[in-house]
Image (cartoon, rainbow, N blue to C red):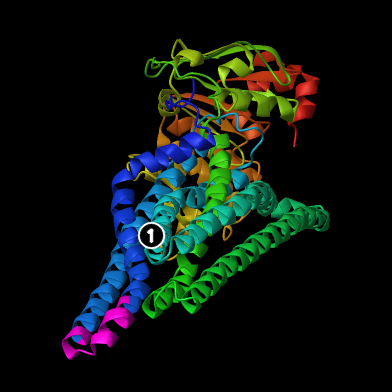
Amino acid sequence: MMTTDTQRPRPGAAILRTALRRNIGAMIAGTVLMGLYQAAETAFPIALGLIVEHTMQDRSLGSLGVSIGSLAVIITTVSLSWRFGMRVLQKANTTEAHRWRVQVAACGLQPVARDVDGLKSGEILTIATEDADQTADIIEVVPLLVSSLVAVVVAAVALSLADIRLGLLVIVGTVGILSILAVMSQRIGSSTQEQQAKVARAGAKVADLIIGLRPLHGFGGNHAAFGSYRRVSTDAKRQAITVARVNGAYAGTALALNAVLAAAVSLTAGWLAFGGQISIGELVMAVGLAQFIMEPLKMFSEMPKYVMIARASAERMALVLSASPVTVPGPERPAPGGDLEVDGVRHGTLRGLKFTVAAGEFVAIAPYQPRAAADLVAVLAVNAAPPAYEGVVRLGGQELADLSVEAVREHMLVNPYDAEIFGGTLRTNIDPSGGSRTLPEAVEASMLTDVVALHRDGLDYAVRDRGANLSGGQRQRLSLARALAADTDVLVLHNPTTAVDAVTEQLIARNIAKLRRGRTTLVITSSPALLDAADRVLVLDEGVITAEDTHRNLLAGDEEYCLAVAR
């Protein structure tokens, strides 16, 4: 049971091919326009040479007018083709980056996490942003590469018409430059991939620190945590400097080689003109082309670097997109209002755990070890998929392995003790979809009414990210209200009242029992109030159920239970 995504694995090369295939139309249009731009730019020095060759010899006003008109057409073509060509390519680039961002984010937000080789959420965030953008750059790189080649070919042909040696010099020089830079680009690709990985790890580290900032301050661990982050960030900084050094060497080498080629063309043309082998007009053309060809050569020589960067980013995206599903989703759906059965589950500290919660029953589990409670919650929430544990969990008579995750989520809600609070309002946190029919009852049952009454905006009171402007108890009650407002057939609550006072806890316990009457409810807690409100209590000790009775009977006859739940 897992995501419905059944796409085949995508290695980096396949991701790049997919991006190119999806944007073939835009790339063809962009290539034509950018090729026209490069051809027109290259035609400018050719036109100047022809003007010198013919117009100045005729000294005709009409010839001069035609020449000026021709230059105006060339300049207009350069301007318009660049503007519309880049517009087409950048739109395709932006759209493709959006597609990959959404796809990576969808994988990261799936109900059951994929096996992503230990990547943390912060690393996936970097992959979904920077790597997605750099992968989509291939949409611009290929047309610019082709258009730069057009400029080099046009220049080589024009120079060959003047003298074959000039054309061969451009062709041989370009091949030599690209051969040298292709070798250097390999280093850029590997260095960039390593840098992205280290930056992602630093991002994941700071995300973890922000989430745990309050507890860190509480036991004085913030300085040690900051030192840990500083080490990771320093490592990322060193790698970034290495990448910058490699990029600088690459850019400097490319510029120097391009300048050497341009100088070689200019000097060769001057030598040929001095010997009378080419005319003055052809010399002007050759010198002009030697200057104009610098830009397409520079662009042409930079393309291998961008190709390697795009490939490195695509390989990192493939870590997420090609990760195997934890398990395959089942096609079945549970019966509405059904029971919950855990049969012989072994996972973590659970040792063949068995119990049943009948449909409509309110059952509490008193765990003597917090780890066992966390392991049980992971199983019920499908954070640990069926292949990750032994035994069977049945929901509405159907095994979890036979159910789709979406069906499980619709039928059973597992609310962890550390449920997330989102930026927005109280209302959007309680009822994100806006379709809850029990929102007022949920607010009242969770005792969130005093928080609502405290603010002029009521339920529309603005909540900061992670509930930063709410107290711990208010955040917990807000999370509980959201769970109750979902009104699912089966509700599992894990320590829902640890941050509230005893009086409020008593009221919440009674309200939950009243609101959930006739609905299946399981509360994993050591709260006496919630244990007392339950129909029966199961004692979870050393991974198995060791006792079962009402809370009051257990208090009267089980000393260990009294010690575990007494406050």
Question: Which sits in the foreground, 565 or 82?
Answer: 82
Q: Position of residue 403 (x, y in %)?
A: 44, 17
Q: In this view, does 112 lie above or below 403?
A: below
* Magenta span includes 277: no
Left or right position of 344 against 56: right
Q: Give the range drawn in magenta.
A: 50-64
Q: Where is residue 16 in the image (x, y as percent from the top left)?
A: 46, 40
Q: In this view, does 112 lie above or below 476?
A: above
* Magenta span includes 57: yes
State whether residue 473 appears in this view: yes
- Binning the other alpha carbons within 10 Å of mark 1 as few (below 14), some (14 to 19) or many (20 upward) gives some
Q: Which residue is drawn at 73% across and 30% down?
A: 370
Question: Which sits in the foreground, 159 or 34?
Answer: 159
Question: Which sits in the foreground, 563 or 227?
Answer: 227
Q: Is residue 47 above or below residue 173?
A: below
Q: Position of residue 533 (x, y in %)?
A: 57, 28
Question: Which sits in the foreground, 352 or 443?
Answer: 352
Left or right position of 239 against 221: left
Q: In which quarter of the image is residue 374?
A: top right
Q: Main secondary structure of the magenta part?
A: helix
Q: Is residue 134 above or below residue 349?
A: below
State whether residue 447 appears in this view: no
What residue type is disc 1 on? Val
Picture quarter with the C terminus:
top right
Q: Mark 1 points at which residue?
A: 157
Element type where label 1 sits in the image: helix
Q: Position of residue 389 (x, y in %)?
A: 64, 16
Q: Which residue is drawn at 36% across and 39% down?
A: 21
